Image (cartoon, rainbow, N blue to C red):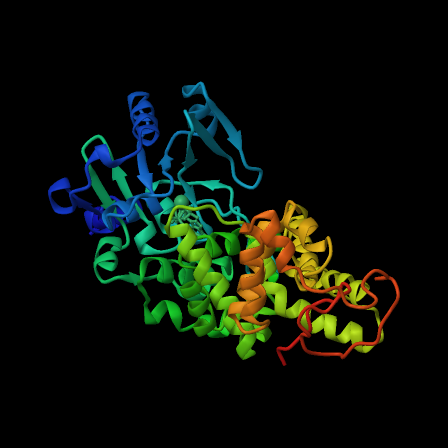
Amino acid sequence: MIKKFIRRVFRLDDRSGPLVIPFGKHGVKRESLSNGARKVCEGLQEAGFSAYVVGGAVRDLLLEVQPKDFDVATNALPEDVHRLFRRSRLIGRRFKLVHVMFGSETIEVSTFRAGAAAEGLGGQHATETDEHGRVLRDNVYGNREQDAARRDFSINALYYDPSDQSILDFHHGLRDLKKKTVSIIGDPRARFREDPVRMLRAARFAAKLEFKIDERTRAPIADMAPLIENVPAARLFDEMLKLLLSGHAASCVRELREAGLHHGLLPMLDVILEQPMGERFVMSALAETDERIRAGKSVSPAFLFAALLWHEVLAALKKEEAHGMRPVPALHAAMDAVLDLQTDKLAIPRRFTAVMKEIWLLQPRFEQRSGKRPYSLVGNERFRAAYDFLLLRCSSGECPKELSAWWERFQHASPDERDEMLMPAEAGERRPRKRRRRPARGHAEGEAGGKPPAPQAE
Ligand code: ATP
Ligand code: MG
C-alpha cells in the first residue's frame, strides 16, 4: 500500500509512464531524420543528456510526409546546449530556446518544460495568466512527462529517440494518428483558456492532415472562440501565416468557419465570406495559393492578405465615394481605413502592408488601355503581382474576363502588336486632373482617368 503510494507520488508506476513503441511497430528509421536532427540528438546524448525529436516532425514521419523542420526536446539547459554546439544561439525572451545550425538547417532545441498543468504534478507553479486565464509566462522547466503534457495535441506529443529508434507515446498519439483525429491533451476548456491559439491550431492540423477534430476537443470551441480576441496581434499574425501558407489554406478557412473561429481573426473575414462575390474571390485566392505551395512555388503573403481584404477595401471605397471624395483619394482613404482596423487585430507587418497597397493602387490602372499608360504599367515592378490580382478579380466575376485577356496579350505582344492593341484615347484623358462626372458604379470598358474599380459586392 505504502509502496504503491510512493510509486504514484514519484510517478514511478509504469502505468503512468509512456507507451514505448519499438521500431518494429512504427518503422521510422533514424535515417529519415535530417542530418542536423540526428547530430543534435547524438551530441546531447553523448554528453549524458536525454534528447528526442518531438512535435510535428515525428507526426509527419509517421504519416510518411516530409517534415517541414525538426525540433528536439532535451533535459539539458539552454546554456548547456549552447555550449555543446559551436554554431548555435540562444533565443527567446518568454522562454529560452537554442537554435543549432547545420549548414542551411536550423534545429530548434527546447528544454523540457512544465506547462500550466504542472501545478497538479507538484511542479513549482510559475505561470502567470491574464484575467481570462491566458498564460502569459510559463517559464518552468520540467521533466519529460510534464513536457509531453504541456503540448497541444496527442499527435504532437510523440518523442522519437534516434539511439534505439523507439517512440515514446504519452497521450495515445499513435492511436489518434491511426484514427486520423486531432485530440487535445487534458481538459479542452482549460487548455484553450491557457492559449486560445490552440483552437486555430486544431483547425489547421485537421485541414492540413485531413483529420477530424474529436468531439471532446471541438465541443467547447464555438463557446470559447471569442477568446481569440485577447491574443496579441503579432502572435495571431504568425499563426494565421502558418495557416495560410500550409498548402491547405482553403480547407483551413472552411474548418475555421465551421468551428466559428473566423470572427475574431480577420475581423472582416466573416463579412467578406458572407457575400457571394467576396467568398468566391477569397476562396479562389486561397485555392491558387495552395496550388502554388503544393507545386513548390513561392507565394507572397502580401498578395494573399491583399486578396483577403480586397472586398473590404471595395466596401470602404464605396463609402468614401458616396461622401463625394474623388476616386484616387477615396481609394487611399479606403485602404488606410481597412488597414488601420485590421492591424489592430492582426499585426500585419509594414513590409507587407506596403506591398498590399501597391497591388491595390495598381488595379484602377488596368482600365487605362490607351496612350502610354499600358506601357508604363507593364514596366512597373509590381506589375506581375498586380496582374495576378486582376486575374483573381476577373475570375470571381468582379470585372470582365476580356480585361485580363487583353493584358495577357498585351504583356507578351511585340511592340507593333502592342501599338495596334491600344484603345482609342477618350476625350479628357490628357487632362486627368480635370474631374469628369462618371457613373457611381459599373465598369465602362476602356474608360480613362484613374478610376478605382467599382465596388460590386453588396
Ligand atoms: P508544423 O508541421 O506546422 O510545424 P508542428 O506540430 O511542428 O507543426 P509547431 O508550431 O512547429 O507545430 O510546434 C512544435 C510543437 O510544439 C508542436 O508539435 C507542439 O507539440 C508544441 N506546440 C506548439 N504550439 C503549441 C501551443 N500553442 N500549445 C501547446 N503546444 C504547442
Ligand atoms: Mg514544426
Q: Please determine whether, in this image, residue 102 is positioned above or below residue 57.
A: above
Residue 73 location (% of width, % of height): 37, 37
Q: Please determine whether, in this image, residue 301 is positioned above or below residue 323.
A: above
Q: Please determine whether, in this image, residue 430 is positioned above or below residue 7.
A: below
- Near-viewer residue (370 or 433): 370
- 41 vs 391, left or right, is left
Q: How many marks?
A: 0
Residue under the point 43% across and 74% down: 258
Residue 336, quarter of picture: bottom right
- Near-viewer residue (428 or 342): 428
Residue under the point 65% across and 46% down: 379
Toward the left, the furthest residue is: 24
Residue under the point 77% across and 67% down: 426
Residue 444 location (% of width, % of height): 69, 74
Q: Quadrant of ligand 2?
A: top left
**Quadrant location, the C terminus:** bottom right
- Near-viewer residue (409 or 70): 409
- Near-viewer residue (144 or 238): 238
Residue 116 location (% of width, % of height): 47, 52
Q: Can I make out residue 228 in this image?
A: no
Q: Can I make out residue 443 in this image?
A: yes
Residue 436 location (% of width, % of height): 85, 72
